[in-house]
């Protein structure tokens, strides 16, 4: 069985602050895939980033960056210089090689002007 | 290209009625997922299919729920009889075939209210 835990239920920051969203996962699979999705107030779910379990290289994409640490089963996501439009619910997800995709409970991010 | 298409977008029904939610995945995608989102339970995986075959239905809450995928371009989620606790947003998502296990593409959701 797999599990994704997002301990932060809500985070509030002021515009231009950096913010990190935490994600811890559990799985018995040796190959798996980790994702972050965004759900803005309009309700749709949008893919943001993906990382494979066999690639621990951390990356930066624009204002987004992520820190994958297999040793601690964590896949944290950072938004640099946050903007009001970043206000949304962010979900971390784990997908197994069999295809099953499990989501965390989400972190509600509010960016105040 | 069209994304995942769900219908209806909104459904209001009375307790005891049958509800059918529909989903058309993105052409060429061979995985299809049904999720339910509520404030209390978050985003729950109900069932997923690969090549039209149900792979894992362990998230289906009870026998009142059933899902089918008769062909690669259509799936239904049926609730019979519906109850007020079934009120939620139901999302359908699809993803492409390998070689890697990719991201899910979500529909806009079907908001169900059972009175």
Image (tube, rainbow, N blue to C red):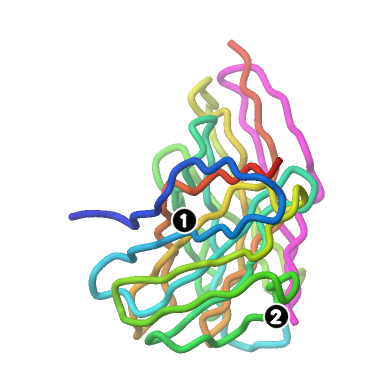
Give neighbour class at mark 1: few <14, some 14-19, many 20+ (Cα, 10 Å). some
Distance between the alpha carbons at the discs numbered 1 and 2: 27 Å
Secondary structure category for the residue under label 2: loop
* B93 relative to B115, above or below: below
Q: Name the residue under label 1.
A: A49
- What residue span does the magenta drawing correspond to? A1-26
What x and y, as percent, mark residue A30? 63, 88
Name of the residue lying farthest toward the top: A113
Q: Which residue is drawn at 66% across and 45% down?
A: B14
Pointer 2 local density, CA inside 10 Å: few below 14, some 14–19, many at least 20: few
Q: Mark 1 lies on which chain?
A: A
Q: In this picture, is A64 found above or below A85?
A: below
Q: Is residue A12 magenta?
A: yes
Disc 2: which residue: B58
Judge from the rendering whether residue B91 lies leftward or rightward of residue A76; answer left or right: left
Q: Which of B66 and A72 is in front in this view?
A: B66
């Amino acid at each position: 069985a797999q599990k994704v835990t997002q301990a932060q239920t809500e985070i509030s920051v002021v515009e231009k602050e950096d913010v990190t969203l935490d994600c811890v996962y559990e799985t018995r699979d040796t190959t798996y895939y980790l994702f972050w999705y965004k759900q803005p107030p309009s309700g749709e779910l949008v893919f943001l980033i993906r990382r494979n379990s066999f690639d621990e290289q951390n990356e930066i994409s624009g204002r987004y960056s992520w820190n994958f640490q297999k040793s601690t089963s964590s896949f944290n996501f950072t938004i640099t210089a946050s903007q009001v439009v970043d206000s949304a619910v962010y979900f971390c997800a784990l997908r197994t090689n069999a295809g099953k995709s499990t989501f965390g409970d989400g972190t509600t991010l509010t960016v105040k002007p | 290209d069209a994304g995942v298409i769900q219908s209806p977008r909104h459904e209001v029904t009375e307790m005891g009625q049958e509800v059918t939610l529909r989903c058309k995945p993105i052409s060429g995608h061979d995985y299809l997922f049904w999720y339910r989102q509520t404030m209390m339970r978050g985003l729950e995986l109900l069932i997923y299919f690969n090549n039209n075959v149900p792979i894992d239905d362990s998230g289906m809450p009870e026998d009142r729920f059933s899902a089918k995928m008769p062909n690669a371009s259509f799936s239904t989620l049926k609730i019979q009889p519906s109850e007020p606790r079934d009120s939620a947003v139901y999302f359908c998502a699809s993803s492409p075939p390998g070689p890697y296990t990719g991201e899910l593409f979500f529909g806009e959701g079907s908001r169900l209210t059972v009175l």
